[in-house]
């Protein structure tokens, strides 16, 4: 979701990459709720951070404590940012409660991406 919103708000001002410490596919609910807000992430992929070791980034943003704590050494001069968003895929409850939590987290990520791009791009 962060990649989708960063791409949306950055437009052509930046090239956005997304990776994690684990690859597990893009959550279908993330695709569904981003599409609900007009952002198509259905073609996004789940990439491992190792794929980007040779890229000279300007910024590296981690969006969960697990990624920040378990990210391997990543040689870069990039400015690092961290914001721990709840993982909506770990939500337990009724289908409606899970859907609402996805929407809440989506809105948190949307606001963060909008603020970040406005300030740094």
Image: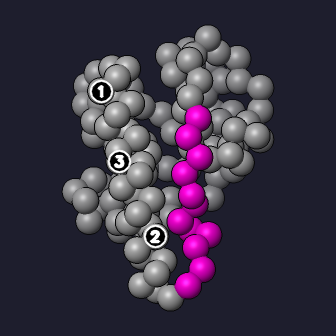
* Residue 38 marker: none
State the count of labels.
Answer: 3
Q: How far apart are marks 1 and 3 (CA)?
A: 12 Å
Whether residue 57 is visible here, answered yes or no, is no
At x 49%, y 50%, the residue is 45
Sequence order check, earlier mark of 3 and 2:
2
Q: Quick check: 94 left or right of 77?
A: left
Residue 56, visible in the rendered structure = yes
Dot 2 corresponds to which residue?
101
Looking at the image, is mark 1 or mark 3 earlier in the sequence?
Answer: 3
Q: Mark 1 points at which residue?
A: 118
Residue carrying label 3: 110
The answer to if 84 sits in the magenta stretch is yes
Q: What stretch is highlighted in magenta?
A: 82-93
Q: Is mark 1 on a helix, strand or loop?
A: helix
User: In this picture, is 76 found above or below 98?
Assistant: above
Whether 14 is among the magenta residues is: no
């Amino acid at each position: 979701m962060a990649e989708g919103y960063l791409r949306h708000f950055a437009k052509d001002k930046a090239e956005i990459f997304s990776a994690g410490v684990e690859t597990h596919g893009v959550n279908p609910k993330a695709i569904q709720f981003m599409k609900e807000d007009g952002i198509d992430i259905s073609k996004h992929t789940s990439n491992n951070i190792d794929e980007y070791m040779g890229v000279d980034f300007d910024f590296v943003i981690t969006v969960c404590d697990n990624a920040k704590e378990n990210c391997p050494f990543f040689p870069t001069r990039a400015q690092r940012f961290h914001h721990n968003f709840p993982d909506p895929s770990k939500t337990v409850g009724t289908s409606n409660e899970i859907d609402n939590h996805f929407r809440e987290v989506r809105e948190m990520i949307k606001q963060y991406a909008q603020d970040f791009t406005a300030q740094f791009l």
